[in-house]
Amino acid sequence: MKSDFSAEMKERTRAADAVVLKALPEESGLQKTIFSAMRYSVAAGGKRLRPLLMAETFRFFGGQDQASLELFMAAIEMMHTYSLIHDDLPALDNDDYRRGRLTSHKVYGEAMAILAGDALQSYAYETACRAFDLTEDPEARYRIMRALQILIRKPGVYGMIGGQVVDVELTGKPVPKETLNFIFELKTGAMIEAAMMIGACLAGAGEDVLAQVEKAAHDIGMAFQIQDDILDVTGTEAQLGKPVGSDEKNAKTTWVTFYGLERSAEDVRAYTGRALDILAGLKAGEDVQEDFLFAYIRWLISREI
Amino acid sequence: MKSDFSAEMKERTRAADAVVLKALPEESGLQKTIFSAMRYSVAAGGKRLRPLLMAETFRFFGGQDQASLELFMAAIEMMHTYSLIHDDLPALDNDDYRRGRLTSHKVYGEAMAILAGDALQSYAYETACRAFDLTEDPEARYRIMRALQILIRKPGVYGMIGGQVVDVELTGKPVPKETLNFIFELKTGAMIEAAMMIGACLAGAGEDVLAQVEKAAHDIGMAFQIQDDILDVTGTEAQLGKPVGSDEKNAKTTWVTFYGLERSAEDVRAYTGRALDILAGLKAGEDVQEDFLFAYIRWLISREI
């Protein structure tokens, strides 16, 4: 079972990868350096967590319009990548490496890295709004419009950027508990909410269902982030995707420093359980525990295979 | 007549100013520094060229839906301001002052200036897409969707950012004639096209009219940019909004260095004439020469009052 899941996940990750890369601009024209810088960072890989969650939520709710879905999968990964490029800049985290490769500003210089981030934010919207050109059906257009609103709001000042601002301001300072919650919810959580809500929305879910999906995604985001803090203490570099103990080294306030390992592990279980219950409740009467979405969420949070 | 125009323009600029500032987020919440940084740069003023051109084009084509228009006016000015904040960064133009005030990174630091630019790009879209919430009429929604597409594409990698990338790459290098054209068309022209096209689109113009408006706006953008190069040699600081001779000082390739003053002045007249002819042609049979839009375009290009 586990190796089945692992193979299946690899296959779906590869498919998401192809969808994302296909949507990037051709590297031609006078401005081709920017196209190359955009592709360099997007192609660096990673779990493709957001597009995969989007696609699996879409499938879970019986979505049909694959072409629109793929545009939004690419868009959310571009959005995520823009935030990483700007995060890594010397004025922010000043990271030379990400996912084992030199960061954008180390390869293309700071000016081009700033513009590459700007370009990916912009091109994420450009990609998503191509979905409008695929249909003249007012209902499909309404779904795309609603999905676009989510894609616009969740990474914004009341979402991802808002969390990032507070994180930057508090670097090296003591972080109150409520603020840690705020940063988790906005900086990481908002984009997981966006991914799952857009998947459901494009599949035709109404506002009631979207609100439930938002709650489930919120809890998944919290569990994911708390588990990240736990793995930083207990995990292997492979599980974590970055050197172990880096939070401690940076004297970072984490869930574990506030609540300890045991309570943190309980919180992960509680958030995950609640999220899966909400999702299962949306398909009452069906056995969804073996659904790939459920397996994927469980894996995401344990990151053990 | 001239003083009438001048008073009228001041009044309409003040109105546009109020529309733009009203749309910014309240300065509250944990992330309030970013709201303050966003407002600081947007409130720095300027001609409000893009929102004014949008509003006047909207009025010219008989637009009625003022609430949607105002959201897009605010959005395009936020988009323009984000590009200025990032332009001024140390890694790009490294400017300490703009419009007589310290630039964003001098006041808020580099990290926050990068995030303020990101936030304004994001909030521009967030503001524009609030227009969707104002109506359930499918035709109005279609116009808003089309306007949003323009707002997304024109500042993007095939528009403003594309021009900016080429400009940055060629700083201090010889610029071929065709490339100067490319930079003018993308870096400045695309946003003028966006402003006028969105105004026409929200007023209900169809694709044929939009294509004509795009052509007229293209020519206005060229005339505006060439006139900028002329004024850098012949103008006063008040006309130019920056120190005279700064292009020469920076050994910048301009329209004047390629074609000389006389030919440049001819080009301004030719582009302007063509733009106004196109617009007049869209209201065949009406006398539009005294329309405020026409007066405003003539003023923009001469910048003499």
Image (spheres, coloured by chain):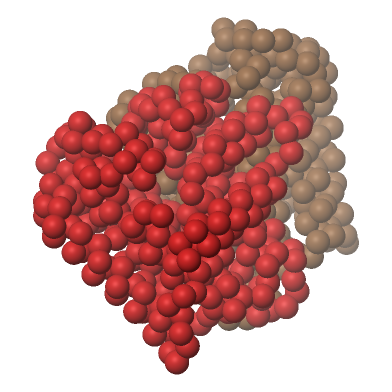
Chain colours: A brown, B red
Tell me the quarter of the picture where residue A110 sits. Answer: top left
Position of B44 compared to B161: left or right?
A: right
Task: Give the answer, above or below, for where A178 lies relative to A50.
Answer: above
Which residue is found at the position 49% from the left and 59% from the top? B3
Would you place residue B140 above or below residue A215 in this image? below
Which residue is depicted at the point 56% across and 60% down? Answer: B8
Residue A211 at least partly seen: yes
Residue A250 placement (x, y as % from top left): 57, 10
Quadrant the C terminus of chain B occupies: bottom left
Is residue A206 depicted above or below B168 in this figure? below
Res. A261 visible in picture: no
* Residue B275 picture location, percent across and down: 34, 72
- Give the x, y percent position of residue B188: 36, 53
> Which percent across, then down, holds residue A217?
74, 44
> Is B49 left, or right, of A30 in this rendering?
right
The residue that appears at 40% across and 60% down in the rendered structure is B299
In this view, the residue farthest toward the bottom is B285
The image shows residue A236, relative to residue B52, as above or below, that is: above
Observer-nearest residue: B257 or A277?
B257
Residue at screen point 53% across, 62% down: B4
**B152 or B41: which is nearer to us?**
B41
